[in-house]
Structure formats: structure tokens, C-alpha cells
Image (cartoon, coloured by chain):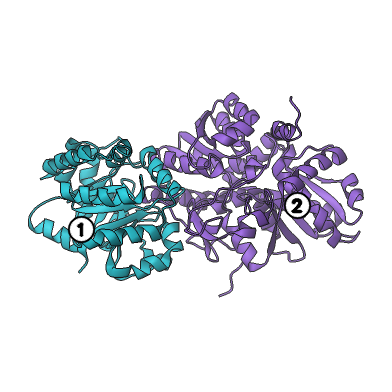
Amino acid sequence: MKLDKNNLPDKNGFFGEYGGKFVPETLMYALEELETTYEKLKNNNEFKEQFYKDLSEFVGRPSPLYFAERLTKHYGTGSIWLKREDLNHTGAHKINNTIGQILLAKYMGKKRIIAETGAGQHGVATATVAARLGLECHIYMGSEDVQRQSLNVYRIKLLGAQVHSVDSGSATLKDALNEALRDWVTNVDDTYYIIGSVTGPHPYPMIVRDFNSVVGEELISQSKELFNSMPDAIVACVGGGSNAMGAFYPFIKFNETRLIGVEAGGEGVETGEHAAPLNDGTPGVLHGSLSYLMQDDSGQVKGTKSVSAGLDYPGVGPEHSWLKDSGRAEYVAVSDDAALKAFHEVSELEGIIPALETAHAFAYLDTLMKEFDKNSNIIVNVSGRGDKDINTVANIDGIKI
Amino acid sequence: MNRLTNTLEDLKNKSKKALVAYLVAGDPDIETTLELMTVLVESGVDIIEIGVPFTDPIAEGPIIQKAHDRALKNNVSLKSIFEMVDKFRKNDNDTPLVLMGYLNTFIFNKALIEDNKNDVIDSVLVVDIPGELKLKDYGVYNPNINTISLISPTTKKDRIESIAKNSSGFVYYVTLRGVTGASNLDVNEISSNIEEIKKHASVPTLAGFGIKSAEDAKLLSQCSDGVIIGSSIVQMIEDSSQSKEFDKIRTYITDIKKAIS
């Protein structure tokens, strides 16, 4: 059987061997209910109109594809284009997915919204859409991330949501996910869980990808308009992988476009101190799906290390695992140091302060641009803006604000 | 024949309810767990569920989460648990032992489950898989170890039927929407759901999650074939981890046993 790369997941939620629905029995009904609702609504004209109307009027889409003139000169090879997801309302791509999922929650009549967040962008995006509909909202966040993303914590609170600081385990994104799942198991009847990445049990990886695919869809028409061809490569950072998946998905069928995901290399992949499961992990089950996972020699999930809270996660969305094994996408890693260097460089060259997550994608241009000539067009998905990271970077640079 | 099936049949013939106790292997350390297993059996426990510690135990409440963390600090692995159970079996070859844990551990350590050297383990309970699936659906197969199916208050009737019909060992009825150790038992809902399960299941139905007092145990044993106690015991183990005095646990188990008899 030949798998159609654009027709996944299969009915059981698998992308090749990855994905699935590995959850406690209590959640099975909720997942089925979500799947049924989504299948019914995704081709419903009224639903689609509402989704695109909100994206246009509330988020400000389409986001521009912007020619990075000085960055292009800096490398002196191909043209570098920036997909400006940082210009979205709330400052990152995360809002695309939450706009879609809150509509599902509304159709399902759920009264209470929960979400996990790492860098806080998904927390802000969820609190934002919940506020808009007047729904009760709870955000789970690792206590370490509450520290390093304090600005976003305050934004979430301003939006009327409650932030729950999670101390268990490594006190980062994976533990926030654990706690959100525990909340969901407890309050499953009236609660909608807005997962923030292409992770978790089926149907989440598919739903989050589909809503965020607006990014890739826009890129197809913008590429034609601006340089009259498909791009030679799209580069995006990968934590759970939602911004990358949204940009990659509509391009899977266009083989001329290289799809490159950049993971968090932390102290360096060779040190083991990183958050790069696609580069240095093995298949395992975490948070409801089978995918590449950082685990030790007895099957325990390993702690991660990254300067970027949004990439600090030991797992990755199952579709990325499938894209890696099938060879359709490439996955590399860059270190904290390289990402920090790119953070400063892009700020100074382009007048755009990227999120630390996004800075990983920029950092890989040092390697990638050597592989291209002047006629090529490279797109970097600018997943979010870096305002939230000012304190972290200032601290590292020894500056008191 | 499997010890679990034997024990449950024996209890049924005597019209008795099963008492299942849960502890986390390696909390506070492997030697103490071994000692505690004997304490539990001496106090009247029929079946022991051995919690296999995992870094991300999403179905557990805070009490059992902390126990998992303590065990992991001691580097407890499925391999060391098998070694511990092997020692336990030298003195007790009758008490059924159930491994309760998370899918990743069992897939990752597939060889240990398939080997089950000396047939020490009788059953596996995987918390994070849907009720109708078995370990063999995930490529881990041992004909002498069954996978216990879970059914929850949110399981719909058609699935209750198919899960119950295909279950082995016993059906684990999760008594509440929530994590282990929570406290929102709804006895009416529980008894009507267990009644539904018993229409279809050929094996006993036991109730677990949120059972704390002898009174809870008594109420739930009236509508089920037995009860499973976890968080309360794990809390007592934590409290006695320094003193290693287990009289409170003995008294607690004895009282529960009386209440369900």
C-alpha cells in the first residue's frame, strides 16, 4: 500500500507507524466526540467562513511574506523571505490554532477551557480567544517557565485566565501537559482542552495542523506572486512542531521545496543536553501518541535543555516523525549559543526581534545558505516575536532591566 | 493456571470480595517494597498491584505522583522490579501480582514482559490505553500474562459491552472522572455502570480510584466483586518511610478487609 502523504492520518490517527490514541479510558469518549465534531464541521461552509473571518479581522491575516534584504546580502547567496507570523495578534502563529479550536469548543457547548503552555504564547493565544467568548480559562505552565516567561504570565492573567504553576517533574512544558491532561480527565464533561501543538492523541495532531496550515496555504500564493515559483526551502523551528507543520503541510506534495525543521540543540546534540528528539531520540509513547522521544535506557522520559521554553520538550508531533522517516523533511539542530547569536543578528540586520524559538530557524541559515545560489528563494517561518524573551536574553548578556 | 484467575475464582466460590492493594515499587526503596508486600498479604490483601514508576504518570494524583518520583530517584526500573518480584516469589508463590504502569515502559522493556522469567508476574494493567486494547496490540505478547481492561464512567454502552466481553483477569472499573486519590465518588452511577459491565463480562469486576475509608470500601464492595486501594496506602508508606513501622498499614488493611467481608 502506498501512503498518500497528504491523506494522513489514517482513520486510527496514524501517520505511518506514528501517532495513535494512547490515553486513559476516561478520555476516549471526549476524543471521539471531538473527532466527530471536527469531521462534521471541517467542510461546513458556515464554520469555514467564521474561521477565516476571525483570522482576517481579529488576527490580521494574511501575514506578509517579507523580503529580508539585509539578511540576504549578509549571506550573499539566495533570497531570504520571512513569513511574518510574528505580526499576528498576540505575537505568534499560536493564535491560528486557538481561533479554530475555540470555535469547536463553542459548537460542542463546552463551558470551560484548559491549555498547557511552554513559552506562554499558546497560553496567551488561548486566554485571548476564551476571553472573546467569555469562557472560563485555565492555563497550566511549568514553574520554571513561569519564571522565565513572566511577561506572558502577566498577559494571560490580564486576559482573565488563571495560571496554574506546575512543580512536578522537570517543571517545564511536558509537566504542564501532564497536569492539563489530569485536569481534563477530572472535568471531561464540561471542559475543552486546547492542545497547543501538533502533539497529543488523535485527532489533535491533525486538527492543530489543519488550522495552522493557513500559513502554508498563504505561502503558496505569496510565493507565486512575489517570486513566481515554489520556494527552494522552508525553514522552521520544531518543538512540538506546530509552526513547522502548518508551513510544511501544504507543501508536502511539492517535492521541489525542501522542508527543514530546526530543533533545539541546547548545549549541543553530542552532549545529550538538548531538546532534539528527531535528531537524538527513539520512538516512544508520551502524551497520547507514538513519536520520536528522548528517553533513557529504561524507557523513562529524559529531561531536556534549551534556552527556549517553547522548544524545551522531549517529544515531537507524530507527523514530523513520519516526515523524517519518509525522507520528505529534514531535521537538524542548532545550539543555544547559535540561536542567541542569530537572535541578536536578525534584530540588528532586519529590525525584527524574533522569538528565541524562531531564532533557532534563523541560526540554521549559517549552514543552509551555503547550499544555495543567487537564484534560489528560501523562506524562514518567523513563528513569533521576541518581546517575551527580552528578560532571558538580558540575563544571559548580564544586563539588568 | 494463572494465579490471578485462580484467586478470583476461589473468592467467588466462597462468595467473598477481593481486596487489591497498590504500592509503587521502589518507594521508599526496593527492600522496603519487598517487606511491604509481605505486610500487605499478612494483613489480608488478596492481590497486589505493583506500580511501575514513570516520569510522566498522567493518571495519578499528587500522592502517587510523588511516590513515582521517589522511586525514580532510586533508579528503579522494570528490570529491578522483576528482580524484586523474583525474591518475593521465593516465599510466596500464591499471591497474584499485577504490574500497573504506563505503555512506554512496557513497550520499551518488551523483552522483560515476554520473558517473565519463572512466571513471577500474572497480569499487566496499562493505565494509558483504551479499554479494548491489550498489550499484544502494541507488539508485546506473553500468553501467560493477561492485560486488565479499564472501563470508566465516560465509557459508552456499546464500548462497555465490547470491552467487558473481551476482558481477562478482571475488569477494572475506574470509579470516578479524575486521577488516583481524588474524592468525588458517585455510588449510584458506579453501581449502575458495574451492573451494565457484569451483564457482559465473564470475569469479575473490581472498583478502584478514590476509595479511601472502610466505609467507601464497604459501599463499593456491595456492587462489585472487590475493591482496589492505592493512594491511601501510598500515603501511609510515605509517612512511615523513616520509621519503617507498618502497624498503621496493617490496621488499615485489616479494617478494610473486615468492612468488605
Q: Position of residue A250 (x, y in %)?
A: 68, 57
Residue at the outermost left position: B14
Say what amino acid the circle numbered 2 marks.
Leu
Q: Position of residue B92 (x, y in %)?
A: 20, 59
Q: Which chain is cyan?
A: B
| Residue found at x 63% / y 50% | A273
Q: Position of residue A183 (x, y in %)?
A: 43, 38
Say what amino acid the circle numbered 1 marks.
Thr
Residue A219 is labelled as 2
In depth, the one of A43 and A305 nearer the eye is A305
Residue B44 visible at all = no
Residue A323 visible at all = yes
State the quadrant of the C terminus of chain A.
top right
Residue annotated with mark 1:
B95
Chain letter of disc 2 in the image: A
Residue at the outermost bottom position: A1
Q: Which chain is purple?
A: A
Q: Position of residue A146 (x, y in %)?
A: 58, 32
Figure check: B203 above or below A236: below
Q: Secondary structure at mark 2?
A: helix
Q: CA distance from mark 1 to mark 2?
A: 63 Å
Mark 1 vs mark 2: give the one in front. Answer: 1
